[in-house]
Image: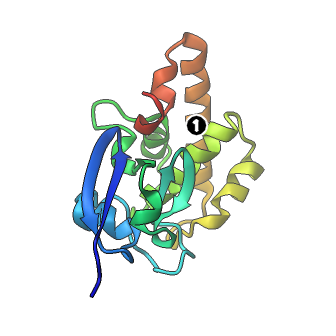
């Protein structure tokens, strides 16, 4: 008999409490329990990175973490970055620089790149490519993704200079 566990997480700045099976993966909790389907399941083996989310500000492949392990954590999914009227700079960069093709990997790529930009606000092309090693895109040669990330970094720097810092952070990080 599986005993359910109560978990409380802050997801995209909203506190959520639910009963989960002890072996439920965070990716399934997000998709099935919270209906946040922007986090994709690509491989179930942590190879592709399509399921990447931010857990307490760090990029994590949510298919490798149990929901009970995230109890008490702050989670940011792609839905928490921005909306159609107020895109996060990384979303705007992907839009303007054509950083996606089929779009399946895009949410995971975006979340991994938000994490990169939080740690390295002005990355080089080489640093972006290195950070992309944990996320597989089967459609592109990555150049448009790299261009999108570098564009986002430049836009975030402009926002920082103008004093509009809140637009450079994902929802879960104090926006």
Q: Residue 125: horizontal and vertical position, in percent? A: 73, 47
Q: Residue 127: horizontal and vertical position, in percent? A: 74, 50
Q: Quadrant of residue 136?
A: bottom right
42 vs 130: above or below: below
- Screen quadrant of the C terminus: top left
Q: Residue at x 46, y 71 (%)?
A: 63
Count of numbered circles in the view: 1
Locate residue 76 relative to residue 84 in the image: left or right.
right
Q: Residues within 10 Å of mark 1 (few under 14, many from 20)?
A: some
Locate residue 129 relative to residue 98 in the image: left or right.
right
- Screen quadrant of the N terminus: bottom left
Q: Nearer the viewer, residue 7 or 77?
A: 7
Locate residue 133 relative to residue 6 in the image: left or right.
right
Q: Residue at x 39, y 51 (%)?
A: 77
Q: Residue 56: horizontal and vertical position, in percent? A: 52, 46
Residue 99 visible here = no
Q: Residue 25: horizontal and vertical position, in percent? A: 40, 72
Q: Residue at x 38, y 67 (%)?
A: 27
Report the residue marked by disc 1.
151
Q: Nearer the viewer, residue 11 or 130?
A: 11
Residue 153 visible here = yes
Q: Residue furthest top?
A: 162
Locate residue 136 relative to residue 68 in the image: left or right.
right
Q: Residue furthest bottom?
A: 1
161 vs 87: above or below: above
């Amino acid at each position: 008999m599986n005993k359910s566990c109560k978990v409380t997480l802050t997801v995209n700045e909203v506190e959520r409490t639910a009963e989960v099976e002890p072996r439920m993966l965070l990716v399934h909790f997000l998709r099935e329990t919270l209906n946040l389907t922007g986090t994709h399941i690509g491989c179930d083996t942590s190879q592709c990175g399509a399921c990447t989310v931010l857990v307490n500000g760090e990029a994590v492949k949510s298919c490798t973490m149990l929901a009970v392990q995230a109890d008490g954590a702050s989670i940011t999914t792609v839905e928490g970055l921005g909306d159609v009227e107020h895109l996060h700079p990384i979303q705007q960069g992907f839009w303007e620089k054509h950083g996606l093709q089929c779009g399946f990997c895009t949410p995971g790529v975006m979340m991994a790149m938000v994490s990169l930009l939080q740690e390295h606000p002005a990355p080089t092309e080489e640093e972006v490519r290195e950070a992309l090693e944990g996320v597989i895109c089967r459609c592109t040669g990555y150049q448009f993704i790299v261009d999108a990330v570098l564009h986002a970094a430049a836009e975030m720097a402009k926002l920082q200079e103008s004093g509009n810092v809140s637009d450079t952070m994902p929802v879960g990080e104090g926006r």
